[in-house]
DNA sequence: ATTTGTCTACCTACTGATAGGTAGGTATCT
DNA sequence: AGATACCTACCTATCAGTAGGTAGACAAAT
């Protein structure tokens, strides 16, 4: 793995563990056993690193959507939840939750990039919900975008709140969302 | 108003706007037109200030619960949502959401205090939900604590996500929660 | 009534640590 | 020779925090 992608990997981990303002280039350089200035060689500014982290998510996200394109809708829903389950396994929160808290402290470019990825996540979930409903596998009466907002906010904050109340609550929230979706009434 | 409570007020505003690691004693001293060292006179450490901000919430929260003790359950539910509506009016997030993101960067004392206030909020909402259900005013099939977790996570992340997608979405989420609660099935 | 001491709530002036960032040099590979 | 990927050495700004001083309010002692 290249140093550049290692920096992104560690930066992402720190971002979702501690927030954008609570990690430094030094944290990354220490972890990689290289000098601080070497991080700046790959990413001139912290904003540039932030943008690269978000771009990485966009690429992974596009690949994931593509690979699931012709899979059953239930598998897609599982993939959606797996993003959050994987984060919980590491006691991390999600990118959107982390940067939403820090929103007014980051550069406009990051705010914009975050806006784009939020749109993509919401649109993905909307398409999953629509497909599942059309196939008679998912049940909900709310407008589909509203339903997507409800599920997304549940998952974002579930990662955060259950840092405090415990992982059992995270599983409860996740399972409740799935049950409500796949069971009539 | 005393300098001490002004410091808490401004500290709370900054905490919920930018996060714990993105505000400094200088931000507060500048706003109050006093010197940095004077903030340290009232709060020896940033942790002490954080604890005082949380303690202020506990006091306000206890007063609110007491004042609503004999009021109709619908009024109590409104008061619960008003906490988040008021935050949204200022584009701020809630204390719990902010500190959950910063959780692993703050002292254990703050983590503990945060745990206590989360318990209090959840227990309050649980008691409201129980009362409303017993009176035939609220409808839900989930275990009451699960329902409380769902509503709380929706509101915490609604404040965060709608910094990005807009206030209209916040209102949509809030109204959906109320509608689902007060309408059968 | 005046002095004295104590307390509160600030102040100036500083510290060491760390932040993000830069200039310029060097080893290696093609 | 030039590009790549590092390095040393440094910069300025800011951070939380400290030492020690002071003006004013108040109360007790003289």
Image (cartoon, coloured by chain):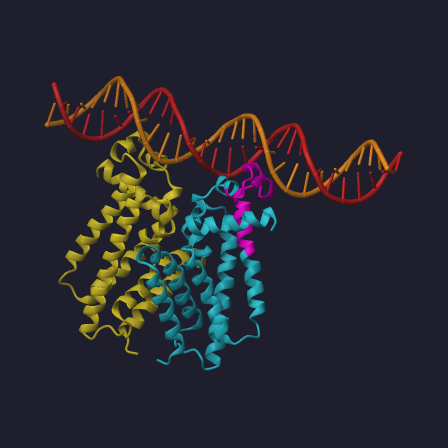
Chain colours: A yellow, B cyan, C orange, D red
Instruction: Report the number of numbered marks.
Output: 0
* Residue B135 percent location from the top left of the image: 48, 81
A63 left or right, relative to B13: left
Residue A35 visible in the current orientation: no
A102 left or right, relative to D27: left
Which residue corresponds to the image point at 38% horizontal and 51% vertical from the top-left? A101
Question: Could you say which is closer to the camera, residue A168 or residue A36?
Answer: A36
- Secondary structure predominantly adopted by residues drawn in magenta: helix
Q: Quadrant of residue B43?
A: top right
Question: Could you say which is closer to the camera, residue B83 or residue A85?
Answer: B83
Residue A165's place in the image compared with B138, above or below, is above
* Residue A43 percent location from the top left of the image: 27, 36
Q: Is A5 a magenta residue?
A: no
Residue B105 visible in the current orientation: yes
Which part of the image, by quadrant, shows the C terminus of chain A?
Answer: bottom left
Which residue corresponds to the image point at 56% horizontal and 39% vertical from the top-left? B34
Q: Which stretch did the figure color magenta? A: B31-56
Q: Quadrant of residue A3?
A: top left
Q: Is B43 a magenta residue?
A: yes
* Residue A160 percent location from the top left of the image: 39, 56
Question: Could you say which is closer to the camera, residue B178 or residue A18?
Answer: B178
């Amino acid at each position: 793995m290249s140093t550049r992608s290692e920096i992104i990997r560690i930066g992402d981990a720190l971002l979702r563990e501690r927030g954008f303002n609570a990690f430094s280039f030094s944290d990354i350089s220490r972890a990689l056993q290289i000098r601080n200035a070497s991080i700046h060689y790959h990413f001139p500014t912290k904003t540039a690193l932030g943008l690269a982290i978000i771009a990485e998510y966009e690429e992974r996200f596009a690949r994931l959507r593509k690979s699931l394109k012709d899979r059953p809708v239930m598998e897609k829903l599982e993939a959606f939840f797996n993003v959050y389950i994987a984060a919980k396994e590491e006691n991390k929160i999600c990118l959107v939750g982390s940067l939403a808290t820090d929103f007014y402290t980051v550069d406009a470019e990051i705010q914009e990039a975050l806006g784009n990825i939020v749109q993509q996540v919401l649109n993905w979930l909307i398409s999953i919900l629509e497909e599942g409903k059309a196939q008679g596998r998912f049940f909900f009466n709310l407008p589909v975008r509203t339903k997507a907002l409800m599920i997304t906010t549940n998952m974002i904050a579930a990662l955060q709140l259950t840092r405090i109340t415990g992982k059992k609550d995270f599983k409860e929230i996740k399972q409740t969302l799935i049950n409500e979706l796949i069971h009539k009434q």
